[in-house]
Image (cartoon, rainbow, N blue to C red):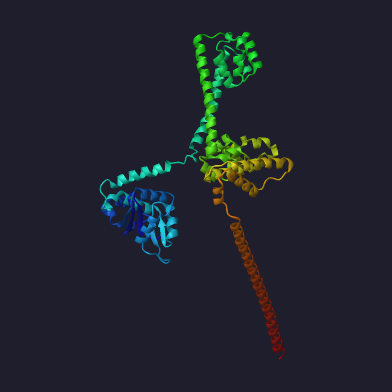
Amino acid sequence: MAPIEYLLFEEPTGYGIFKVKLQQDDIGSRLKEVQKQINDFGSFTKLVELASFVPFKGAAQALENCNDISEGLLSEHLKAVLDLNLPKGSSKKAVVLAISDKNLGPSIKEEFPYVDCIASELAQDLIRGVRLHGSKLLKDLQPGDLERAQLGLGHAYSRAKVKFSVQKNDNHIIQAIALLDQLDKDINTFAMRVKEWYGWHFPELAKLVPDNYKFAKLVLHIRDKTSLTDDSLHDLAAILDDDAGIAERVISNARISMGQDLSEVDMDNVCVFAERVANLVDYRKQLYDYLCAKMHTVAPNLSELIGEVIGARLISHAGSLTNLSKQAASTVQILGAEKALFRALKTKGNTPKYGLIYHSGFISKASAKNKGRISRYLANKCSIASRIDNYADDPTNAFGQVLKKQVEQRLEFYATGTPTLKNEVAIQEAIDLFNKNRPQEEVEEHQESPKEKSKKRKLEDNKDEEKKRKKEKKEKKEKKDKKEQSDEKVKKVKKDKKDKKDKKEKKDKKKKD
């Protein structure tokens, strides 16, 4: 490995280029004596010296460069610094530069072909030494300048990372769907407890009214079963969605109920708990409406295609809408069935055909033999919808509607053999649907005129024709070359045969003589 010549050090205040005067041995870099040499300022100055330090113009430029480096990009400022301070390399001798982040290496190499970037353990040790003695090596800085710059840049970088777009914020969806699932479990558990507790007083009511919310509301309204009379029929029917038949049965069962009487204190506690359950159900409805509205804002196409709840579960399981959009359709298909997948791989059994998307109505509509096929097709469309939602500037559900139509047609195709809408036609239909609700000026701005389209088409046709001509020429040339080669071979073979014949004849003549 070539020795390190220069060292790039990224400071919150600017970029520092250090020249490496004496390089340690790579083998002995972990020895205590070597590590001590780096920690000691006097010894470390024998290893490196400051070649150049270029400060940032302000906090905005520092943050911009920090963002570029974190993404492994070479900023214009850093490019200028390297261009000014590094010697010009050549193909015979490249300049070796030590860097802290190996992801920055390819970007530097792209701009400076004769600069080899190294992020080895030895390079990291030297950078650690520079960081440790930074305030002494950079003499023009005042005490505490580096610490203040680090703190300011750290806060600015964190703020920039935490900032989000209101339109694309999927964190609330992840939290909402998690809370919704938790509420479902809690409501079921608490409702069972209410039924069991109130069942001591009126056991017949649980069989008459299985719905948890209606049961809790009835408990609050009835309290003591002896208070029910024929006059209560209208109020009970109002709670039971105007079902007078069940209301009459509740009143008649209350008269002959086998339950025991409860004291006022016990009844109060039962009613307080029933009220909590009813409030939880009301809150769950409110949360569901909020989740639907949020899904229609953040992922309108996905929610249109597969439903708000399943779409939210997919986003939650993937971690974010961006992560989901990066997943392949085959991964989306089995999201949520990871345990079954790895168990199948371990036991060499059949892998699962679906995960979270199993709860979609499309899969339940399909026949048993077509469930795997439709789940694969649906996962493909979900993947497309999530990508459109994540990368589109204007949120719209037009693509979701067309994709849903395609999935419905595919189901019909499995049943009757009717052909499905082609992707090209479907996307064009979605674009037309999207442009329908937009102002005409915007549509014209984004659309190409017929003349431009025809010009484009002519250019493409010309290019294709040119490619064909070149290909034909190449093929003709190759055929010609092959023919010439074969002719030459035939000639050579004939010549060899003739030579052999002549030699034989000469030998025969000599023998005769």
Q: Out of 200 and 65, give the one closest to the viewer.
A: 65
Quadrant location of the N terminus? bottom left
Q: Is residue 175 above or below residue 465?
A: above
Q: Splitting the image into 4 quarters, where does residue 493 fall?
A: bottom right
- Residue appearing at x 71%, y 88% in the figure: 511
Q: Position of residue 415 (x, y in %)?
A: 72, 40
Quadrant location of the C terminus? bottom right
Q: Residue furthest bottom?
A: 513
**Is 285 left, or right, of 207 in this rendering?**
left
Q: Is residue 177 above or below residue 277?
A: below
Q: Is residue 59 above or below residue 283?
A: below
Q: How many marks?
A: 0
Q: Position of residue 75 (x, y in %)?
A: 40, 54
- Residue appearing at x 39%, y 50% in the figure: 64
Q: Is there any visible trace of residue 337 in the rendered image?
A: no
Q: Residue furthest right?
A: 416
Q: Is there any visible trace of residue 461 in the rendered image?
A: yes
Q: Position of residue 469 (x, y in %)?
A: 64, 67
- Residue appearing at x 54%, y 31% in the figure: 289
**Is 35 left, or right, of 105 in this rendering?**
left
Q: Position of residue 307 (x, y in %)?
A: 59, 36
Q: Out of 242 and 508, give the one closest to the viewer.
A: 242
Q: Is residue 487 above or below residue 28?
A: below
Q: Splitting the image into 4 quarters, where does residue 494 fall?
A: bottom right
